[in-house]
Image: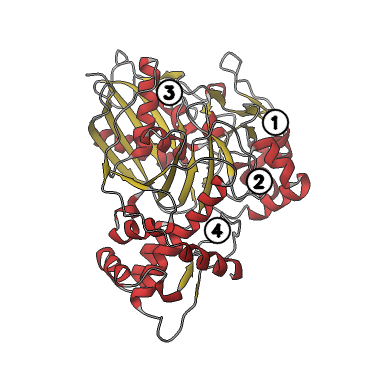
Amino acid sequence: MSLVAGVDSSTQSCKVVVVDSSTGQTVRTGKASHPDGTEIHPSLWWEALSAAMHDAGGLAGVRALSVAGQQHGMVLLDSAGQVIRPALLWNDTRSAQSATDLITELGAAELASRCGSVPVASLTITKVRWVRDHEPSHAARVAAVALPHDWLTWRLRGYGPAGESPLGPDLEQLTTDRSDASGTGYWSPHLESYDLELFEIALGRSAREADPQASSAASSVVILPRVAGPAESVGTVHGSLFDRTTDDVVTIGAGAGDNAAGALGLGAAAGDMVVSVGTSGTVFAVAEQPSSDTSGTIAGFADASGSFLPIAVTLNAARILSSVSSLLDVSFDEFAELALAAQPGSDGVVLVPYFEGERTPNLPHAKASFHGLSISSTTRENISRAAIEGMLCGLASGLGAITATGVAAKRLLLIGGAVQNAAVQVVAGQVFDVPVVIPKPGEYVARGAAVQAAWMLHGERPDWPLETIVSPAADFRPEILTNYQEAAHKA
């Protein structure tokens, strides 16, 4: 049995899966939590990775490993490899004005054509600009800018802060992959390269891509991680880590952004739409050509296989359900029962669920609102169902935007923790005008990282089977989405 490991360093936790590379069978798993918040010191990711790896039984027997991580998080390093400030995460919206400033300076069409996306507060480029404008002393110290999975891969190889890592702060060894790089806002999916001018406009300093053959001597030029290929090895896990000997060689893959890794884990191909309902909500497809949406609804990312990943993202997803169920003082099972007791369309009640602002549409300062309430319609049942319909309608709008660009939608793969709610499954069949398939619950981002590790190890992408559960009945009710879109427009 040849084992590979996949890591998912997400917003909320770190998960590790160890998989038989021949069959795709999960052999063992581990998990550790991350603290809440929209900024976090990366050292806490490293501690969680170590704990999750220990929980998974370490790397015994593992021949290859890859790390997937939450996209867009900004990790700033100085010349000694020290983290300059806590990483600003994708869900930190303080850089909303910075996004507006970049669009004002360059234009939405120009930015979309150059980096595939119109910047919103989530993207790394806006956070870099925010640091330049609000923390100039920190901006002056920046020697390298990395993303969460880049930094963890670097640490796994033995690099890191001086005095705290076996190999020290060689910033030229920083690596990333095309999927995560495309979420920065300063890497071009069309050209497959960094747009260094965009980065300089953001930070006010010039940059270059890391070169592992170059000296890591101090320089005023900022280093950006080298972009490795989908099946490329970027090094090995340092032998002193995780109670291993230097004889245990574990090869490390390029890694990926979380959504791209999820697509690998699901085996998504052309014609597949993936909707993930987690802390955030995402809808994305595998496409053969890069996209450039000047409206900003779709981010034109690259994927982790060599294709592209047009994606729409909502900041508000599973937490909508937890917030409303908490308001009603019911368990998730009771919440589902209430929702299923209401009629489709919730008797005209609509929840526009912008609790934490919103990314798609780009409304970082918006708040949630109920619409269509009357004396008779204001019931616990209607409010429960409206919460689920609002959550899924936001994603359905994103799906519609992607298919409007010409991307085919033959089936929809619905994943994420909230999808296990029975009412979510029923409502999905009414909101999405595409056959819905619900895969068996699993850690698909970590599994996707394991797919990449196996691909690197054996030289070809594995075709592991995807287990699914019963799909919801197709019962498309277009009026649900229409009512939602009308209420969202008013809001």
Question: Would you name the residue on which mark 4 appears?
Answer: 358
- Residue of label 3: 253
**Residue 388, image x, y percentages:** 39, 63
Q: Quadrant of residue 143?
A: top right
Query: CB atoms at circles 4 and 2 under 8 Å apart?
Result: no
Indicate whether 56 appears above or below 63: below
Residue 99 vs residue 300, the one in the foreground: 300
Above or below residue 99? Residue 326 is below
Disc 3 marks which amino acid? Gly
Residue corresponding to mark 1: 196
The mark nearer the N terminus, 1 or 3, is 1
Q: Which residue is mark 2?
A: 118
Residue 373 place in picture, x, y as percent = 46, 80
Contact? badges 4 and 3 (CB < 8 Å)? no
Residue 178: % across, % down:
54, 29
Residue 57 horizontal/vertical position (percent): 23, 31
> Label 2 near label 1: C-beta < 8 Å?
no
Of the 4 image quadrants, the one containing the C terminus is bottom right
Q: Earlier in the sequence, mark 4 or mark 2?
A: 2
Q: Give the residue type that dot 4 points to.
A: Glu
- Which residue: 68% across, 46% down? 294
Give yes or no for contact between labels 1 and 3 (Cβ–Cβ under 8 Å): no
Q: Are marks 2 and 3 in contact (CB under 8 Å)?
A: no
Q: Nearer the viewer, mark 2 or mark 3?
A: 2
Quarter of the picture holding the N terminus? top left
Mark 1–mark 2 distance (CA, rounded to whole Å) = 17 Å
Disc marking residue 426: none
